Image (cartoon, rainbow, N blue to C red):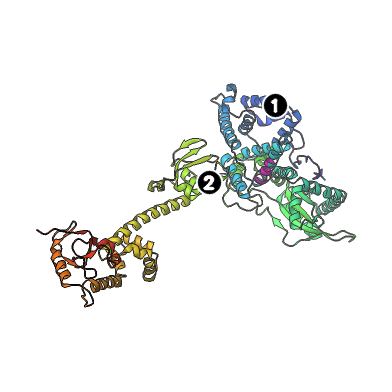
Amino acid sequence: MSDLTGAENSHIALPPVMGADYSEVEVSIKDFEEIFLSTPESVKLFQIWFSKQNDPDEANAFLNKLKYFSLSTSTIMALFLFMLYQKEEDIPTDIIKMNPDSSGIILSESIQLYHRLLKVHRIPFSPKKKLQAELAIRMLLTMMADVQLLTVFLVLQLQKLESMMSLSKDEQEATSWTALHIYAPLAGRLGIFWIKSELEDRAFRYLEYENYQNLKKKIARKRSERSDSVERISNNIQKMLNQAGISHEVQGRYKRFYSIFQKLDRVDNDFERIKDLIAFRVLVKNVDECYAALSFIHENWTPVKNRFKDYISNPKPNGYQSLHTTVMEINDDRSSEPRPIEIQIRTHEMHHMAEYGVAAHWLYKEKRNKYDEKKADQIKESLLEKINSDGEGKLSPVVNLYSDKIYVITPAREIIELPQSASPLDFAYAIHTEVGNRTIAAKANGIITSLDSSLYSGDEVEILTSSRQEPRKEWLEFVKTRHARNKIKHALHEKDREIRKKEGMEMLEREFRSHSLNLNRLIRDGRMEKESRLKKNQEFEHILFCIGEGSIHSEEIRRWFADDISTEQTSFNQVTESATESEAVTTKEKSAAAASRSLIIVDGMDNVSTRIAKCCSPVKKQPILGYLTKERVITIHKKDCSFMKKLTPERKVKVIWGNRN
C-alpha cells in the first residue's frame, strides 16, 4: 500500500504519482534544464531566476511542482520572465534577441505568453461575491486561453498561498478567499485535483481558523481508528483482487479537511454522523481490469443504491475517467455494523490524468509509450473543447477556453461579461441604463477611447457622462448587446413620443379655441383625463401622442365636448340677446347706447359689427371690453361686468369709445 497522506499535517506533502517512472525522483537543477529547456536563452533565464532565490529549498519545491506537467520551453520562459521582470523593457537584450531559427520562434511565443501573465497580474479585481468569482474564472480562461499557461499560473498561486506569513491579515484573507473561490475551482476545471485540494485546505485554514482547529482535533482523535480501518479494508480489497488474478495497487486515503468541512453542513454539523473519513483507490493496468475489479468488489460487498458512477464510459468534460462506487463493508466475524466505503477504480494513466490534468497528460504518455503525436494532438484538442467543466462534471453555461465573451472591469473592480468586440457603450448600458443614455466618452485602461472602439478581456473601463447627453440614432450602428440596442431604441422612441405629444397639444388647443372651448380649464378640472379613459380607454397623454402622429383627429376629441359649446352659447344668448321687462333701462339710456354703437373702436379689426350687451348696458365714458361671438359680432360689456368674467378669455377683445364728428 502506498504512503498515506495525513490530512492533519499542517504542510501536506505533494501526492505521489503512481505508474510514472520519473515521479518518485526529485528533479535536480540539471534534470530540469535537460527536460524543459531547449534554447540557450531559456537556460540563461532559468539560471538568472535560480541565482536570485534566497531559499534554495523553496526554489526546489517550486520546481518539483512544475515537474509533473508537460510544459513547453515557451511556457517555462514566460513563467520565469514573469517572475523576474514586471516590465518588458527590464528584460536584458541578450535574452530577448530574435534569432531566425526555432529558438527565435520559441522566444516569440514566450513573450506573448509573458504578456498574458502580466495583464492578468495587473487586473485589480477583488470579487468577494460568488457571481463575481465565477466571472473571474471565465476571465482567466479567456485571457490566458492556454492550458499550460493556466497550469503554471495555478502553481504560482499555490506558491503564494504557501508563503503568506509575510502578508498582513487583510492581505492573507483576501488571498485565501481568492484561492478558495477562484483558483481552486479553476484547477478543478482543468482537472488538476492535487492543486485544487491544496488550495482549498490552505485557504480554509486562513479563512476559518477556529473551524479548522476544531476539525483538526476531532480528526486527530480518530487517527488510530482510521489507520486500523485503512489497513483492514485495504487488505480485504487486495485479497479479493488477488483471488481474481488482477494485478493491482490499492491506495487508502484520508479525506481532505475542506471536503470534510463541507460535509458537516449536510449532517447538521454533527461530526459523528460522517462515516466516510477515508476512501480507497484501486489502480489497474487497463479498462477491462477496471470493470473486472468492480465486479469482484460488488460480489463481496453490497453496493449502495444510486452511488455508482461510470466516468470511464462517460468521462467528465475535463477528461476525468474513473469508476466510483460505494459499498457496505461486512466484517467476517459480523462483530460490527456495516459501514459505507467509497472506492475509485481506474488505470494508472487515468490516475495521472485525474491528479495532474490535461497539462501533465502528454508528458506521462511520452514517458511510457512514445505515442503517436498526431493522435495525441487529436486527444488534446478534444479535451480542450470540453474544458468548460465546473469541476464536478457539469457543463458551465458560458465558460470555454476560446470563449466568445470578454470580461472587463469597472472602476469599482467588478467584472462585467460582454460579447466579443463589445464597445464602451455596451459596457455603459451593462452598468445602468441612465449611465448608457448619458455617455459622452470612455476611458480604457486610463486612455480616452472612442465609443465605437472594441474592448478586450481585462480592460479597466471608465465611463464619462453628462446630464445634457441623449441617446443618438447612430449608436445603433455599433453596439453589440441586445440590452444596449433595446435601451437606445426605447430612449429614441420616448424622445419621439414627447415631440408628438407636444404637437398633439398644439393641434388640440387650436381646435378647441376655434370652437370657444377652454382646453386648459378642461385639463385642470380632470375632464380631459376622464373622457380619454371613458371614450378611448387611454390616458390623455397617449391621446395627445396619437393626435401628434395622426392616428386620431383633434376634431374627434373636440366633439366629446359638444354639449359644453351649446351650453355656453345658449347662456350667452339668454343674457345678451333676450330683452326682459324687468331690466330698468330708461329711454334716454337706450338712445345713448344706440348712439354709441357708431362710436366704438375695436382694436385691430375693421368693419366689425358691434352691439351693446343687455346684461350691463354700458354708456359713454364707462370702461368697456368686447366679446367676439360665433356670429363674428362684438358685444360690448362694462369692463367689470360679472357675466363677462365667465366667458372664454381667448375671445375677449380690446375696445374703446370713439369721438363724434
Secondary element under disc 2, as helix, strand or loop, is: strand
- Tell me the quarter of the picture where residue 574 sits: bottom left
Q: Is residue 95 above or below residue 229?
A: above
Q: Is residue 510 above or below residue 1?
A: below
Give the position of the C terminus as an image quadrant: bottom left
Q: Position of residue 581 (x, y in %)?
A: 21, 78
The magenta stretch spans residue 538: no
Please give the name of the residue rendered at 17% of the width and 67% of the height, measured from the top-left corner: 611
Q: Looking at the image, is mark 1 or mark 2 earlier in the sequence?
A: 1
Residue 58 visible in image: yes
Q: Position of residue 227 (x, y in %)?
A: 86, 49
Side of 162 where 455 appears, left or right:
left
Residue 368 visible in image: no
Magenta region, residue range: 174-187
> Tag 1: residue type?
Phe
Q: Is residue 457 above or below residue 531?
A: above
Q: How many numbered marks are there?
A: 2
Q: Nearer the viewer, residue 587 or 459?
A: 587
- For disc 2, the neighbor class at 10 Å (few under 14, some 14 to 19, many from 20) is many
Q: Position of residue 449 (x, y in %)?
A: 46, 37
What kind of secondary structure does the magenta stretch mostly adopt?
A: helix
Q: Which mark is residue 405?
A: 2
Secondary element under disc 1, as helix, strand or loop, is: helix
Residue at the spot of label 1: 50
Side of 130 where 204 appears, left or right:
right
The magenta stretch spans residue 186: yes
Q: Nearer the viewer, residue 76 or 447?
A: 447
Q: Are marks 1 and 2 in contact (CB under 8 Å)?
A: no
Give the position of the N terminus as an image quadrant: top right
Q: CA distance from mark 1 to mark 2?
A: 38 Å
